[in-house]
Image: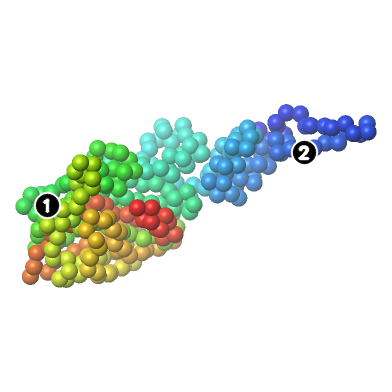
Amino acid sequence: MGANISGGFPEFDRNDDVYSRKPRLVDIPENCVALIMTRLDPPEICRLARLSRVFRRASSADFIWELKLPSNYRVIAQKVFDEITLRKLLKKDLYAKLSRPNLFDSGTKELWIDKNTGRLCLSISSKSLRITGIDDRRYWSHLPTDESRLFQTLRSKMFQSVAYVQQIWWFEVGGEFEIQFPSGTYSLFFRIQLGKTSKRLGRRICNSEHIHGWDIKPVRFQLATSDNQQAVSQCYLNNNPGNWSHYHVGDFKVTNPDISTGIKFSMTQIDCTHTKGGLCIDSVFVLPKEYVKEVIGSE
């Protein structure tokens, strides 16, 4: 990016033999435009870049996007890109790629950064969760669907299924992971649905015949971090059959982005006095607390 004044010759008008100069946006030096852009949000920078070639060139400056990326963006990017790709990418292009869903961990998880806060977002497929009895087809199965959140965002054939429990005595679903989060407060959710849906003659229908047991005893949600933060909650699963719902497990805070945070989470109903069933599990979300309504409210 050049630091000189660009955009052609300034415009002059002749009035009574006196030349008067009319300043234009293109007369602003690119480096000044770039400095202004450092104080704007990424969506505002993109809108401003459409005004002229000068603004578009200024918007590509690496130092602008270095400020918009999380301070630990290199560690996050290494989860999804190899070193050769990282060296070739401009910071603007890296930001654009990271702000879209990216698969990692053998394609069972996705990550992206929130454009407004620069914080990390995660989605974990049901295939990456630890589910007691998942291999016993008497209790569990993987249902083909195009309603998985991961399939909707990535259109990947790997995520054309959700975990479905028809009937079980001991219900236990959990998982764990470790990653360096940018500083901030994060919320963890399970995305689940009572009943199983399918399409018939182009219409979405819900089969609720296996739904039972969730109104007898509450489900217990737990969250624990490697720095001893904990959250526990209980609730009955009483959402309307056929509607995907997000059940809040808990929140945790990250103060040091240079240290990995380990997360363990679970969803259990292990009272063996009765069976329960008819439940679909799609994924687990970890989102910046300020970003929750935008993601979950969009469904």
**Horizontal side of residue 258 vs 50, given as left or right:** left
Q: Find disc 2 in the rendering and name its residue.
A: 23
Q: Position of residue 255 (x, y in %)?
A: 44, 61
Q: Around disc 2, counting alpha carbons within 10 Å, would you say few (fewer than 14), some (14 to 19), or many (20 or more)?
A: few
Tell me what residue is drawn at x 28 percent, y 69 percent: 232
Badge 2 marks a residue whose secondary structure is loop
Q: Is residue 62 left or right of residue 176?
A: right
Circle 1 residue: 140
Instruction: Specify whether residue 266 is in view.
Output: no
Q: Nearer the viewer, residue 129 or 142?
A: 142
In x, y percent, where is residue 149? 30, 48
Q: Residue at x 93, y 31 (%)?
A: 17
Classify mark 1: residues with Cα within 10 Å, few (<14), some (14-19) or many (20+): many
Above or below: residue 257 compared with residue 32: below
Q: How is the image coloured?
A: rainbow
The disc, 2 or 1, on the residue closer to the chain's N-terminal end is: 2
Residue 47 in the image: above or below residue 173:
above
Res 190 seen here: yes
The quarter holding residue 174 reads bottom left
Q: Amino acid under label 2?
A: Pro
Where residue 180 appears, x then y in whole percent?
38, 52
- Nearest the eye: 109 or 70: 109
